[in-house]
Image: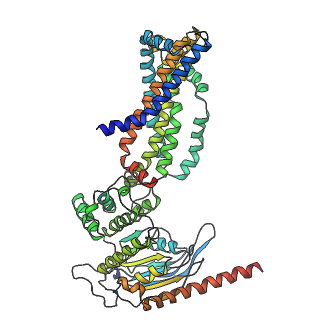
Amino acid sequence: MIARLRSIAASVAPQLIVLVVVIFVWWAAVRVLDPKPFIFPSPGRVLDTTVNDFDRLWIGFKNTLYASVVGFFFATAVGVGAALFLSLSRMLERAFFPWAVLLQTVPAVAVAPLYVLWWGPGRQSVMLVAFTITLFPILANSLAGLRSADAALVDLIRLRGRRRNSWFTFSKIRIPSSLPYLFTGLRISAGLAVIGAIVGEIVVGRGGDEAGLGYWVTFGSTQLRTDFVFAAIAVSSALGITFFLLVSAAGNRVLRHWHESARTAEA
Amino acid sequence: MGQANAQGSGGDGRAAPVDMPQAGVTVAIEGVSRRFRTGFLALTEVDLTIGAGELVAVVGPSGCGKSTLLKIIAGLLTPTDGVVDFGGDRPETGYVFQDAHLLPWRNAIRNVELFLEVDGVRKQERRERARQALQLVGLADFEGSYPAELSGGMKMRVSLARTFATDPQLMLFDEPFAALDEITRNRLNNDLIRLQRDRGVTGVFVTHSIGEAVFLADRVAVMSPAPGRIVGIVDVPFGGDRSAALRTSAEFAAVARDVSEIMAAYEVAEGQEIMAAKE
């Protein structure tokens, strides 16, 4: 137990040292250069604001969390479903996948106003932006994963009378083979979902009960309250990181044996 | 017809243990050619008959169509010309590749169960047969180990067990031990011989190691460079006695020399063709 704690401490310590150094440099720079607080606030000031405006940030945190999680789950369902469909044949993949790539090239900021136009300036538009931005990594990675199944083993199963697209092959070989890839996609998308929600909130621009962190960023900057903008950004980063870590932890748990094989391959 | 269920012992008088089923099947390859869609002719007019319980090694330079021939026998590829006749229904076929092709998320015994699962064998029987198969390859103590925890040779053994668990009548080996070190490879060859002969399973073993071919097989078929065809068959007169000492004997060396002379003749021929083409 103590050894375990020690190893966790050893892996976390370097990151924490970097954080402390960065904050110190920030603090020292503000101290020496003395910029106007609305141009560049000090770390202490940002911390004060975080505490004082906790209620607003908390509302923002909850709304952004909700929108990004819902967008993320829809993207997972749609992305995995579409990947399963496209993996049924090379023909389907050739016909549809290039169009899916289009998803990735369309900037979320550009489609957000359209969503507002079509579905109004509410939560659903924010979720849709999060959904749009997270869909492609999940789709592309799970498709690559489904394609990664051991072809020779699929052949051996074919010899025993089950086709490539049989339920047996999917459930016992192809879907499990795709999981490491799927989780790579989910990890990327976890961070993106928060970004998508914030972009959506900035475009939607609705405050009050529906105010997300993106709204508070806009709000803070129009009021020249840079410290509040900083605080909102910090909270959204924390949210993104937490989301990413949760998905990673889930992945590590599911993929224990895959990781062992990866470890042996390295050695 | 009805040859598939023949109880033959390969016709060379080898005695098999009483309680082991003689499962071998006759394989008649008649005029098999295969041209790929690219126009590449991989095999041309291959004729080869393999008796029940016989193990034939196929040697040849890489790219000569050895693997294509195995895939055609297995039914994974259809020949452009010719037929493969089993004298009845397609037999239960085991296919072993160069890599073990195990599922990393399943432990050894669950990997061995995979094909039985495909066949719809019930859980309890599956478990039992998988356990026996693991015992057969000497991995009884490793049934709970995951592939990542096993050495290359052990993974290959799990792969063999997975195939033997289905009680094949015909075994196809596509350079199964090529990726292993020589010690492991020899050990697996010894075990393979034992399994093969005890059960009287018919086998086709593709390799480019002449030593391995002579040590394992009843006959060695030599293939020419592409387009592959069979250019010579060498009988290996050692019967069922394949002890480790055989490898260093003069008789062994003589047979190996016969095989390599046939191979060399065709390599030279090809070399001359290339020279002729350049002029």
Q: Position of residue A29 (x, y in %)?
A: 59, 17
Residue ID at (36%, 80%): B25
* Along the line of sight, the residue nearer the viewer: A60 or A256: A256
Quarter of the figure with residue B150: bottom left
Left or right of B263 on screen, residue A70: left
| The residue positioned farthest toward the right in the image shown | B279
Asked whether, in this view, residue A161 is left or right of residue B14, the answer is right
Colouring scheme, one of rainbow, by chain, secondary structure, one colour = rainbow
Residue at image point 61% right, 35% down: A105
Q: Is residue A81 visible in this depiction of the protein?
A: no
> x%, y% of residue B31?
53, 82
Count of marks overlaid on the render: 0
User: Relative to the observer, which residue lies in front, A21 or B264?
Assistant: A21
Taking depth in this image into account, of B65 and A213 the one nearest to the observer is: A213
Give how far across and how far down residue A230 sits, in percent: 53, 17
Question: Split into 4 quadrants, where in the image is the N terminus of chain B?
Answer: bottom left
The answer, for residue B75, to whether it is visible in the render is yes
Q: Tell me what residue is drawn at x 51 percent, y 86 percent.
A: B259
- State whether residue A267 is above or below residue A101: below
Instruction: State which quarter of the image contains the C terminus of chain B.
Output: bottom right
For residue A2, above or below residue A164: above
In the rendered image, residue A132, in percent from the top left (x then y), is placed at 53, 31
Task: State the residue in front, B244 or A214.
Answer: B244
Q: Using the image, determine if residue A262 lies above or below residue B228.
A: above
